[in-house]
Image: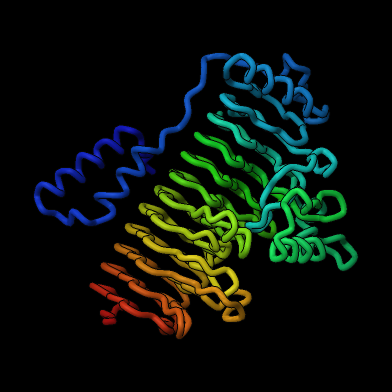
Amino acid sequence: MATYTRRHALAAVAGAALAGSRGWAADDPWTTLYPRILQRIQPPQFPNRDFDVTCYGAKADGKTDCTLAFRKAIEAANRAGGGRVVVKEGVCLTGAIHLKSNVNLVVRKGATIRFDPNPKLYPMVLTRFEGMECMNYSPFIYALDQRNIAITGGGILDGQANGEHWWPWGGKRGAKPDDPNQRKARAALIDMVEKSTPVAERKFGDGGYLRPMFVQPYRCTNVRMQDIAILNSPMYEVHPVLCRNVTVRNVTVSSHGPNNDGCDPESCVDVLIDGCTFDTGDDCIAIKSGRNADGRRLHAPSENIIVQNCIMKDGHGGVTMGSECSGGIRNVFAQDCQMDSPNLDRVLRFKNNAIRGGAIEHVYLRTVKCGQVMGAAIDVDFYYEEGEKGPFTPVVRDVEVVNLEVGKCANAWSLRGFKNAPVSNIRLKNCTFANAAKPAVTENVEGMTLENVTVNGKVVKA
């Protein structure tokens, strides 16, 4: 698939100007807003200095604990003004890796960083669990309040999560009835959020069984992940939180555990997800902005998100928004993606309810080809989890889908709003649903338009 570069961004801007000068749909967000977002997203660059982890005590034998070596190499690169911390070959076993400003962690092709499943190697840090801030196990690769950080190189990050380690805490994938799990701690965290307990007092870690994320830059600026494969995560794979200017390019994710989302930008601004492949146990991409009271407290929407040239295999949804969306989600562009799996549930998915609230708006998808999905190709669900049992108004509005081709699905679309909170302004144009097993579902929807939409070979009108 094509990879977009700065040259493409400049060409898009020029095209937008030309469209305006000739009177072509000058108000089309693809020719106005999209190129401006794309031009702003610029991956960080790093000084031409290498810091080989073996020079700081690492042994790439897959047995030696390299945690301290990674720490020393990263600190040295940071003190020097930046550079590349390099894993050249072999397998480096480690605990948590904490990146610092101006450091690019380079895992070269043929090399692997393997994360030890011992929870004690992941000390407590500020993190988010299902959209709620807390003090919990460090993500495997973490950064807090840093600038110019990256993970690149062509190698592998192996989380070693499986039916014996990490996944049973989620209550699935090999969990036995007497295995410890996260239910008690998760309920306690939800209660703390609703009671406005200070984040510093929301302490979990050992004994809580809240799983850590794999890669989580937190409140960072200028973040890049490129040419990396990620395997077997405890929970979300790539989870930037409260970050600005994020590039995730040519990343391959393969992980089928519980809540194993592929890439979840949360409360982030200006994010590009380009040329990635997702084969996941949950949503391939899930855009989020905080859960319930925490999302409203921080009031930090996810906005200006671009997804393009990606492949989605297994997963609950190809491009998903929510369910943690209380801070709002807006200006999402998705294009030129391929989706196809009997274990992929939906193409485009929106999850909201009267406990979450929050507005999801200005979402534009075009030129997506899908062989098959298990459920509805386009799904808006206000009855997700708590449904109507809450005081907040869920919002999904201004969604445009153009040139979507779906071979096989349960329904072409399932749009379920509330009577007092209808889904609004849904536009489908030039879309084909070749084999839909059941009729489309449209409940409490206002302003839906269909133009050249066919379902099972028949043109459908709104």
Residue at the right extreme of this rendering: 178
Residue located at (69% from left, 40% from top):
158
Judged left or right of residue 160, residue 8 is left
Name the one closer to the observer, 163 or 271: 271
Residue at the left extreme of this rendering: 22
User: Is any part of residue 281 visible from this angle?
Assistant: no
Judged left or right of residue 118, residue 15 is left
Residue located at (62% from left, 74% from top):
385
Name the one closer to the observer, 373 or 421: 421
Identify the coloring. Answer: rainbow
Judged left or right of residue 458, residue 289 is right
- Residue 68: x and y in percent read 79, 25
- Residue 140: x and y in percent read 71, 40
Name the one closer to the observer, 435 or 395: 395
393 w.r.t. 55: above or below: below
- Residue 66: x and y in percent read 78, 27
59 w.r.t. 397: above or below: above
Number of marks present in the image shown: 0
Name the one closer to the observer, 275 or 122: 122
User: Is any part of residue 274 visible from this angle?
Assistant: yes
Residue located at (37% from left, 74% from top):
424
374 w.r.t. 4: above or below: below
Question: Split into 4 quadrants, where in the image is the C terminus?
Answer: bottom left
Q: Quadrant of residue 296?
A: bottom right
Q: Quadrant of residue 75?
A: top right
Question: Split into 4 quadrants, where in the image is the N terminus?
Answer: top left
- Residue 211: x and y in percent read 75, 52
